[in-house]
Image (tube, rainbow, N blue to C red):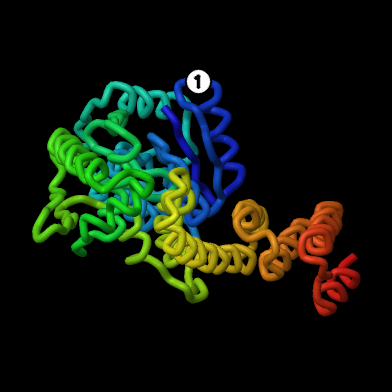
Amino acid sequence: MKAILIDDEKPALQHLERMLLKDGRVEITGKFTSARLGLAHLEREKADIVFLDIGMPEMNGLEAGEYIAGMDRSTRIVYITAYSEYAIEAFELNAADYLLKPVTSQRLSKTLERLEVGKESAEVKMPPTPAPVKELSILCFHRLEFTDSTEPGRKMQWRTSKAQEVFALLLHNRGQWILKDTIVDLVWPDFKPEKAVTNLHTTVYHIRKLLKAWDMEVLVEFSQERYRLTKEQVLLDVEEFELGYAGTPVESEEEWLRREKILKLYRGDYLQEHHYDWAEIRRKELQVRYIRMALHSAEYELSSGRPRLALERLLELQAADPYSDQLCRLILRSYADLGDFIGFRTHYDKYKELLENELGIRPDQVMDSWVQKVL
C-alpha cells in the first residue's frame, strides 16, 4: 500500500514515518508539512492511504479531506489528532480510521490491519462501494486513443493507418459535414478517384465496426456525398482542456489545483504522433494555449515559494518553445531562488549560444544586465 503523510509538526511526521518503516506494510511515497503541498502531490501521483493531521494552519485536515475525497474516492484517509472530539467529525467524512497523538505502534498496527483486510469496525462504518460507472474517452493529445474506465488496460486496434486518419479527420471536424471528395483528397491524394472512394467506403465500415465494439455513442453519418461525426456521452480530452483553459494569472491555491487537472490532460501536442498536415494549425493553437496556461502556473509556484516545482515545469516547456525570453527569465529566476548559480550561469550561456547559432541574435540588453547583476 502506498501512503503519504501530512502533518505540520515535523517531529510528529518523523515519529509516524519511523513507526511505518519499522512495520513495513506501507510504502511511504511522500511527506508534507502543508496540506496544500500534499494535495498537489496527489494531483500528480495516486496514494492508497493518506495519514492526515487534523489541526493544521492555513488548511486543516478535515477541509483537506474533502478535497481528497473529490479527487479520488478510493483513497483512504487516516486522521491524526491530539483532540479526540475531532474523531466524530472525521468519520462523517468517511475516514478509514483515526489515531490519537502521540501515536503508538500498537494502535497503528491495528489501523494497518483494518486497512489491509478492509474490515468495518464498530467505530468506522464505511459506505458500500458503488458499482463502477463505465466512462469512455477519446484522447487526442500526443496520440489518438480510446480509453474505458472499467477496463484500464484495454487496447484499441485500427484496421489500417488510413482508418485511423479518417476517424481523426472526422473527429477534428466533429459536428460538421465534410465532402467525400475532400476526405479522399486529404487521405488518398495519390490514388485514382474511383479507387480512393472504394477505400473510403471500406474504411468507414471498419471505423463503425470499431466504434460498435467499444460501445461508443459516436456516429459516422453519410448524406448528400458528405460525412460527419457526432458524439454523445463520450469524453474528449481536447474539449475538456478548452473548457478548463484559463489564460490569466493564478490567484489562489484552489485555482492552481484546478488548473493542474486541466494541464495534466495535455500529454503531448495535438495528434503529435501522427503528423497529419491538416491538424497542424490546430496543434499550434493548442500548444500556445498550453504554454500560456502553464507559464501562469509556474509564476504562481515561484511567488508561493516552490521554485523546484516551477523549474521542472519550465524546463519541459522550453522543449516546445526554446527561443522564448519569457521562459528563459523564469527558468533563471527559478535557479536563483534555489540558490543554484552554477545552473543559472550554465542555462543562460546555453540560451545565448542557441540564439546566436540558430537566429543570429543576442538576448536583449535588459535581460543581459539583470543576469550580470545576479551573477
**Residue shown at 34% from the left, 48% from the top:** 187
Residue 270: x and y in percent read 43, 54
**Residue shown at 90% from the left, 70% from the top:** 372
Q: Residues within 10 Å of mark 1 (few under 14, many from 20)?
A: few
Q: Quadrant of residue 226?
A: bottom left
Task: From the viewer's side, name the closer residue of 307 and 329.
Answer: 329
Report the amino acid beneath label 1. Answer: Gly
**Residue shown at 61% from the left, 42% from the top:** 11
Secondary element under disc 1, as helix, strand or loop, is loop
| Residue 135 at least partly seen | no
In the rendered image of this protein, does residue 115 appear above or below residue 72?
A: above
Residue 31: x and y in percent read 55, 42
Which residue carries the number 1 mark? Answer: 24
Task: From the viewer's side, name the closer residue of 325 and 52.
Answer: 325
Side of 359 where 237 appears, left or right: left
| Residue 289 at least partly seen | yes
**Count of numbered tags:** 1
**Residue shown at 35% from the left, 57% from the top:** 238
Q: Quadrant of the C terminus?
A: bottom right
Residue 126: x and y in percent read 20, 38
Side of 72 where 343 appears, left or right: right
Q: Quadrant of the N terminus?
A: top left
Side of 235 where 366 appears, left or right: right
Residue 150: x and y in percent read 22, 34
Residue at the outermost bottom position? 366
In the rendered image of this protein, does residue 248 appear above or below residue 153?
A: below
Task: From the viewer's side, name the closer residue of 204 and 23.
Answer: 204
